[in-house]
Image (spheres, rainbow, N blue to C red):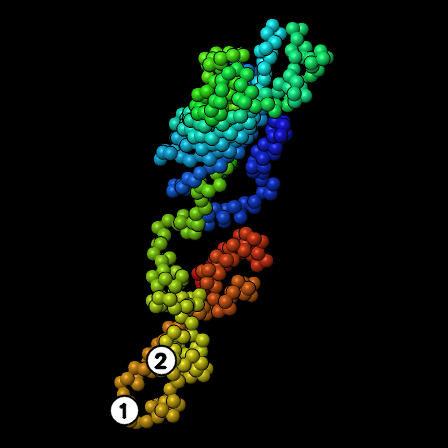
Amino acid sequence: MKFSTFFKLSLVLLLSYIPVNIFAQDPDEEYLESLLKEEVENVNLVYKPVIGFGYGYMNFYGEVRDKRQNPLTGTPAYKINVATYLDNKHYFKANFFLILGQMGGNRYSIAEPMENINFKTDLTIFGINLHYDFKPFIKQGSLITPFISLGIENVQFNSKTDIYYDGVNPYVYGNDGTIRNADGNIIKRTYNYNTDLRDLNNNGLGSYNQSTFGIPLDAGLDFTVSSRVTMRLGYSYNYTFTDNIDNVSSKATKGVKGSSMNDMFSYSYMSFHFDLFSSPKTIIMEKLFADVDNFDYSFYGDNDNDLVYDGWDKCPNTPMGIEVDTTGCPYDDDKDGVPNYIDKELHSKINAIVDNDGIEIDSEKLAGVLTSQQAISRSEVESFLMMQKARTRYNIGKSSIPIPQRYKRLDKDKDDYISFDELLDAIDEFFDDSPDLKSTKDIYELNDFFFAQ
């Protein structure tokens, strides 16, 4: 991938994360939404590892190097990075990285044709570094953050050279700067790096280790794209513990002998880092009536845990686990005043007189009780009175105010009562272009009706 192509792709990704407000929200809707919801800072952030992907260029600094080098040219390399915080203040990160790429160099000499040498190697680098981003010195909310890091890495290489123009015969470098074949004809290099330098052993270095450790020093800038995306421009300078990457060393016993300085290389790159798993930095808090002064929050408790607030729970002491209607009272399908969960006769006749167990009282016995001059037992009187009390208690929750026709559809359980849950559903529908609620005035009127029930 060319750097220009990668740059264009990065620009598209950057622009895709810039928020653009195309449609303006109605001021009344904004005000109503501000009463119900508020975006607040998440004070209990949980940070997870951040994944990064990058692309850049490598330049080699050793005996065999290109004369013209800059951070925007060189051999390509790709980087994968995983970062996680190490301290509570989030000043330090540990970066685990993998770099896959190539590196090479060319050395020309007219005076010494034997020193016209070149190499190219595939690289596999993995390591860890300690990352510091100067947060204590940067203004909070800044979109640009500098960083510096220092670490240790393992560098694996396998250097090859372009020495034969036809796979058999070597290039002949003339004192006039030309390259010729065995017949003396001028030719051009093929740049086919297919000869292993270590196996060639033209400098007498033997079978040296092609894996070494290095120390990367990294610095750059992080640009905040969004709360979860960061773009990084970085430059790392890598010091290795070998002088054999280009196959030229001070330990050579023949051929070209190099300096005693170990090999080094640089990596300039651009990367994107995605925080996909951490907690959001802000959360939406459901305010409801949080802004009302001296508001009694106990009014919105739920002592019997039936999901109906105590303020409009008509049966506030329902046993645990009993299914209730929108008023908080247990269901009573036959309307005999005895809720289903204790009703031993679930389908009593309409307007039938029942006992405490919901069982219909025999009409002859009831008639005898009402007409007879004989005394009746206390238990029979208590049974009759308790039944009447229960009948009243389980019907008091129903509103005596009829629901206006335009709000009928909002009574989803068809119990002729707009419950608190149904009120909240109506408000949610308002923001989704409800056919029943056209303006904030309708919301206020519905709210007034709810408390008037």
Q: Which mark is residue 298?
A: none
The residue depicted at 62 percent of the width and 30 percent of the height is 1
The answer to whether 182 appears left or right of 409 in the picture is: right
Residue at position x 51%, y 65% in the image: 411
Element type where label 1 sits in the image: loop
Q: Which amino acid lies under the numbered mark 2 shown in the image of this protein?
A: Asp
Figure check: 289 above or below 24: below
- Amino acid type, callout 1: Ala
The reply, left or right, for residue 13 in relation to residue 373 is: right
- Image location (x, y in percent) of residue 449: 48, 61
Give the number of the mark in front: 2 or 1. 2
As displayed, is residue 260 above or below residue 362?
A: above
Question: Helix or strand or loop: what does disc 2 sit on?
Answer: loop
Instruction: Name the residue beneath numbered marker 2.
Output: 357
Residue highlighted by disc 1? 375
Q: Position of residue 148 (x, y in %)?
A: 44, 24
Q: Residue at x 52, y 15 (%)?
A: 203
User: As drawn, is 78 to the left or to the right of 179?
Assistant: left
Q: Is residue 382 above or below residue 267?
A: below
Earlier sequence position, callout 2 versus callout 1: 2
Q: Out of 191 and 422, give the one closest to the viewer.
A: 191
